[in-house]
Image: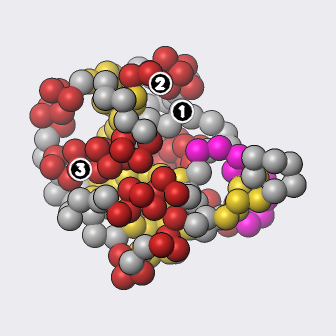
Amino acid sequence: MPITWHNAADLRALANLGSGVQLKGFGSRIQFQLPETQQAAEKAQAWLRHHPREWLQWDGDCYAEDSFTALIPQFKKEHEGCICIAFVLQRNAAEFSESWANAEFVIQAILCNEDYDYAELGTFAQHTMSSLSVTREVFCFGGGGTIEQEFHMRPDKTKIFHGVCLRRQGKQEGEWEDTEWYKGCDESKINMV
């Protein structure tokens, strides 16, 4: 299915989207074959299933079978009318297109020319989507320091970050990395499912 590319000026066409969720998480090294990761994925899908949305947005992460993006095709299958929106850094556009080439749904991709780091991109996406929609929530499938930075820079409309904890393989063999983004955040603004 095609990716429809937009620039920031095109965002008005997406105005009044209603309610939506921004999906975040570990972008690599998730071991979906592990029973505890499968349980976390089931919890994430159950939360998404019971909180239907008109749109799902992520920060331009490429599709990968060891990434939180592996959850998106299943979500889209269960929510056919949901609009999928990705904010993609211009320097990552070709890789993004290639990784999502086999998607069976349309992705509305917002091309970001700014030289953001990933926390800045996520914050830009949160603020932009808040200005275009009625309500929005964030759901995190794992995650670390970048998500914690985004939590602290979130817009007022983003009241609560939801998420599941999981471990992923570390950068070195035999090491493991835990979900840690929520540990430095206001507990009243977090719902771990």
| Image location (x, y in percent) of residue 163 | 50, 66
**Crowdedness near tag 2: few (<14), some (14–19) or many (≥20) residues, C-alpha within 10 Å:** some
| Image location (x, y in percent) of residue 124 | 29, 44
Q: Nearer the viewer, mark 1 or mark 2?
A: 2
* Residue 131 visible, this orientation: yes
- Dot 2 amino acid type: Asn
Q: Is residue 30 magenta?
A: yes
Image disc number at residue 127: 3
For the N terminus, which image quadrant?
A: top left
Q: Are marks 1 and 2 in contact (CB under 8 Å)?
A: yes
Residue 180 located left or right of residue 7: right
Mark 1 lies on residue:
62
In terms of secondary structure, where does tag 3 sit?
helix
The type of colouring in the image is secondary structure
- Dot 1 amino acid type: Cys
- Rendering quarter of residue 158: bottom left
**In this view, 111 is above or below 38:** above
- Distance (Cα) linking label 3 and label 2: 21 Å
Image disc number at residue 92: 2
Residue with the most extreme right position: 174
User: If you read the primary sequence from the N terminus, does the residue marked by circle 1 or circle 2 appear first?
Assistant: 1
Q: Are marks 3 and 1 in contact (CB under 8 Å)?
A: no
Q: Nearer the viewer, mark 3 or mark 1?
A: 3
- Dot 3 amino acid type: His
Residue 131 located left or right of residue 91: left
